[in-house]
Amino acid sequence: MTTTQPRIQWLGRWGFVLAATGSAVGLGNIWKFPYMTGEYGGGAFVLVYLVCILALGVPVMMAEIALGRRGRGSPIDAVRRVAAESGRSAAWSLLGWMAMLCGFLILCFYVVVAGWSFSYLWKMLSGGLAGGSVDDMVAIFAANNASPLNLGLWSTLVTVVTMLIVGKGVQGGIEKSVGWMMPGMVVMLLVLILYGVFSGGFSDALRFLFVFDAGSLSSEGLLAALGHAFFTLSLASGAILTYGSYLPAGASIARTTLTVAVADTLVALMAGLAIFPAIFANGMDPGEGPGLIFMSLPLAFQAMPLGTLFGVLFFAMLSMAALTSSISMVEATVSWLCDRQGLSRRAAAWVAGGVLWVISTLAMLSFNVGADWTLAGRHLFDWLDYLTSRWMMPLGGLGTALLVGFVLGAAPMREELGLSSAWHALWLYMVRYVSPLGILVIFVDALGIVSVEFATHWPFLLGLLLAISLGGELASPRLRRTLSDSTPSREGVE
Ligand code: PFF
């Protein structure tokens, strides 16, 4: 059954920007980005990540929002409708299915990490982080994970809170909470950065984050940077597309995308600048892995004036940031359950929440009683992260780029994006060639199909391929038409 009511919309341009920023800024920026940077060698990883955001993330995000607004539905319905409008097969809705599944699977491990954040907030409040050495912090993190009851309680709490908010609807709550959570997060990060500047370790952190050392980048790191660019912008997982489906007709997609991408990137870089001084000053290993921020930041908070207050505020903000992202991950599933299965929002939220609880509880056990339950060397927690970030998101991004770049007619995207001819041609070029080739090249390398020393040769290879594609396009009548076509678009020229 399909609903016939008009789709609810955000309160305005800022409603969408706030909600999309709330989705993008989350544990990915503050928990995952620093530990991945540590694992994959610092500056080189950061540079590739920034290139991926700009060259692949931004164009694909614009495409997702445009698809959502054009199709006005869950990812499955929106993609099917937009494809049908151009006379294309309904099979393209598989892209929507994959996105919806991807968002849901991410949430299954995300609630466990959000549970860490909540439990550290509680520890900060109750004095459970006493002890001044790195070893103490490592022991506290390990003890927090060792009890399935403790960890399960926190991830269950996150699941319940997420579903309560989602059940209430996308409006008001999200828009309002992000409005004060984001500035709060920025202030907390600034406090930590300032503390780092005066307490030592800051110049090491700067060098680690921003000095590009090509030799330290593995092809594994390249794929990780690509996957993370999609993860941090919430792409290919149904969130942005579904939020786009609530976007009012007049809002500029390009401007909102840039706002979200810039805010997201700034928060990630600030998180790096806040966390690494504490790591270097305490002689910790930047490659510590997922526990990195939970082991390093409490040490910094203990040593700084008003540390407990700042610590409480920080973990409160982190937990909020995690929630505004979690909400967006199930939004696609809930929207589909409402639109297609006829459930009420609240019922849809609890059905999704029930399934989520079972899978996330199993994922949580990876840290304690299920430590030996591995498949090909990975726990369920690692599998969920690996499958979504390394495979489903890049594949989803590739599919989206090909769909909007080659499969759909020119009109839908021109009308939705409303760019001037030159900007539209640039965007089209990015989604047709730069994004797919970037994704393919990194896949080819990761699969070991061709063994190339990517750290030194991949820019050259990519440049060559792009030059060929540009030459081909300029020669083709279709792009020439796009470039010279000055038909006024629906939203005017950007
Ligand atoms: N972008 C979020 C973060 O960086 O924490 C994670 C995320 C949210 C991924 C929503 C996917 C998604 F659909």
Image (cartoon, grey):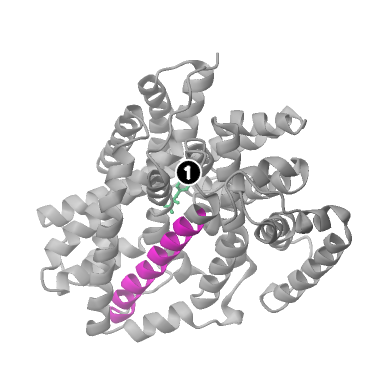
Front in this rendered view, residue 443 or 341: 341
Q: Amino acid at mark 1?
A: Ile
**Residue 351 at x, y = what percent?**
41, 23
The quadrant in which the N terminus is found is: top right
Q: Position of residue 483 (x, y in %)?
A: 76, 59
Q: Which residue is mark 1?
A: 106
Q: Is residue 372 above or below residue 299?
A: above
Q: Which residues are magenta?
A: 257-282
282 horizontally vs 312: left or right = right
422 w.r.t. 202: above or below: above
Q: How many marks?
A: 1
Magenta-span inclusion, residue 274: yes
Please name whichever residue, 71 or 462, is drawn nearer the observer in this view of the structure. 71
**Left or right, residue 436 beside residue 318:** right
Q: Confirm whether residue 97 shows in the render.
A: no
- Is residue 375 a member of the stretch shown in magenta? no
In this picture, residue 311 sits left or right of residue 381: left
Q: Position of residue 199 (x, y in %)?
A: 22, 83
The residue located at (14%, 67%) in the rendering is: 307
310 shown above or below 400: below
